[in-house]
């Protein structure tokens, strides 16, 4: 099989703690051992991918950085790691990869730099942020780690809406490289049920490789090593080598867009009579939040909802500047730490209020109430 040179793969899921960074770091090391040249791009301010290679986030302390050639800055900050054939672009604190503009600087940089590599693996942030949309827009495919627990399925359902939105509006060539089941414990009935459930819905889109829960995988980053450096004979190292082999062996899926089956809207009993939340009617309502984040300067009508949408999760971790651009001026402001928005309801005589709670000018959580009562 002739592999597409310079393939950019995002490792992404809106849910945190599912193994995105672990997969990005260890998969890159496995691909390197299999003689593929790999670049890891760390876009998370926590810089966990960088730490896993024994580095930290980088600060250039150069006030002229934003005015320099963006691609040259990136090339000059790429680090050769001790893992064979693996380079790292650490998170750079004073360089904004995702500054709003008509043309994506990040996309242009990835397209240029990927010509020097077989694979570019992009470690995404958890939660939904504008930068994740831009990363998916810049990628050829996406690997979706799925932790083997019930709540991960809820997060998976939400993330698939994001993928479909990107395919429809931003990157029609984006496809799912595969769903990767992580933190699998064969002793637990729940893990087996999650595996069966995901495979029954997504079939050949699910990798054959299972990443089992492993203390050695957890310990490796504390030594600044990948699992293949920490213990090449461990089950975790063998699993990531198997995953790398699967990815290399996959046939190219250029110009193809996958049509995903939506998890059923009706109540379906799984995991001892627990049901997935009924998502009826929420698909279209997610688009309004996406559009506001993508086009913050455009006027977008107020959300009209008959039931409280879950898509306000998109506002978590955004600062006040972006909140005001996305949502407009708030209805009431309580000492700057609580912003209150009024949201129209289908019943004209009733109102709902969205409460955004800030700490250090960042949204930490939100709440909704029928009345303004702090």
Image (cartoon, helix red, strand yellow):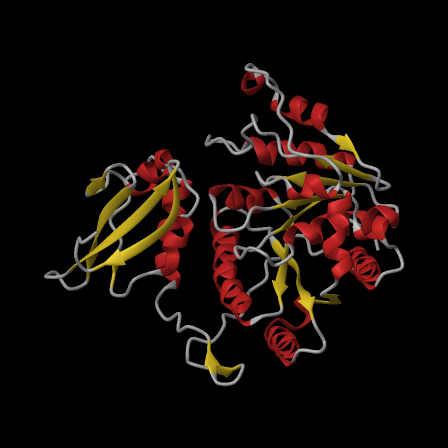
Residue appearing at x 61%, y 24% in the figure: 70
Residue 196 higher or lower than 246, as above or below: below
Taking the view exactly as shown, the residue that stands out farthest to the left is 349
Determine whether, in the image, residue 310 is placed left or right of residue 138: left
Quadrant in which the N terminus is drawn? bottom right
Q: Residue furthest top?
A: 64
Q: Can residue 1 be seen in this view?
A: yes
Say which quarter of the image contains residue 265. Answer: bottom left
The quadrant holding residue 93 is: top right
Nearest to the observer: residue 250 or residue 189? 189
Q: Where residue 319 sits: x, y (%)? A: 39, 37
- Left or right, 116 with respect to 10, comes to right
Badge count: 0
Q: At 49% from the left edge and 70% from the top edge, which residue is drawn? A: 262
Whether 65 is drawn above or below 12: the answer is above
15 vs 200, left or right, is left
Could one spot residue 2 in this view of the protein? no
Q: In which quarter of the image is residue 138?
A: top right
Is residue 220 or residue 145 the one in the foreground? 220
Residue 254 at what x, y percent from top left? 68, 52
Q: Position of residue 52 (x, y in %)?
A: 72, 44
Q: Residue at x 56, y 25 (%)?
A: 94
User: Residue at point 75% right, 63% down?
Assistant: 214
Report x, y in % for residue 210: 73, 67
Closest to the observer, 330 or 337: 337
């Amino acid at each position: 099989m002739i592999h597409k040179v310079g393939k950019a793969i995002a490792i992404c899921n809106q849910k945190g703690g599912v193994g995105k960074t672990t997969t990005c770091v260890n998969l890159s090391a496995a691909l390197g051992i299999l003689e593929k040249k790999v670049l890891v791009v760390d876009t998370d301010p926590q810089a966990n991918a960088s730490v896993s290679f024994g580095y930290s986030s980088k600060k250039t302390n150069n006030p002229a950085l934003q005015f320099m050639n963006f691609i040259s800055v990136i090339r000059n900050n790429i680090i050769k790691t001790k893992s064979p054939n693996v380079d790292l672009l650490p998170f750079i604190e004073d360089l904004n990869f995702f500054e709003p503009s008509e043309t994506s600087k990040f996309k242009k940089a990835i397209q240029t730099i990927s010509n020097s590599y077989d694979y570019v693996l992009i470690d995404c942030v958890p939660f939904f942020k504008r930068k994740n949309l831009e990363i998916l827009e810049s990628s050829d495919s996406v690997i979706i780690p799925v932790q083997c627990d019930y709540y991960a399925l809820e997060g998976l359902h939400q993330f698939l809406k994001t993928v479909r939105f990107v395919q429809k509006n931003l990157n029609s060539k984006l496809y799912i490289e595969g769903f990767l089941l992580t933190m699998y414990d064969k002793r637990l009935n729940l893990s087996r049920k999650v595996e069966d459930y995901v495979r029954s819905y997504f079939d050949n889109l699910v990798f054959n490789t299972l990443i089992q829960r492993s203390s050695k995988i957890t310990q490796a980053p504390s030594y600044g090593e990948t699992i293949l450096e920490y213990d090449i004979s461990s089950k975790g190292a063998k699993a990531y080598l198997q995953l790398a082999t699967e990815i290399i062996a996959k046939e190219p899926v250029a110009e193809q867009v996958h049509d995903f089956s939506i998890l059923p809207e009706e109540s379906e009993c799984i995991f001892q009579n627990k049901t997935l939340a009924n998502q009826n009617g929420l698909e279209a309502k997610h688009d309004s939040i996406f559009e506001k984040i993508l086009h913050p300067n455009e006027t977008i009508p107020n959300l009209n909802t008959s039931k409280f949408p879950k898509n306000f999760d998109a506002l978590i971790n955004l600062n006040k500047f972006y909140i005001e651009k996305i949502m407009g001026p708030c209805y009431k402001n309580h000492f700057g730490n609580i912003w209150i928005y009024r949201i129209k309801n289908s019943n004209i005589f009733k109102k709902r209020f969205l409460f955004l709670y800030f700490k250090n000018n960042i949204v930490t959580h939100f709440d909704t109430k029928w009345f303004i009562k702090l």
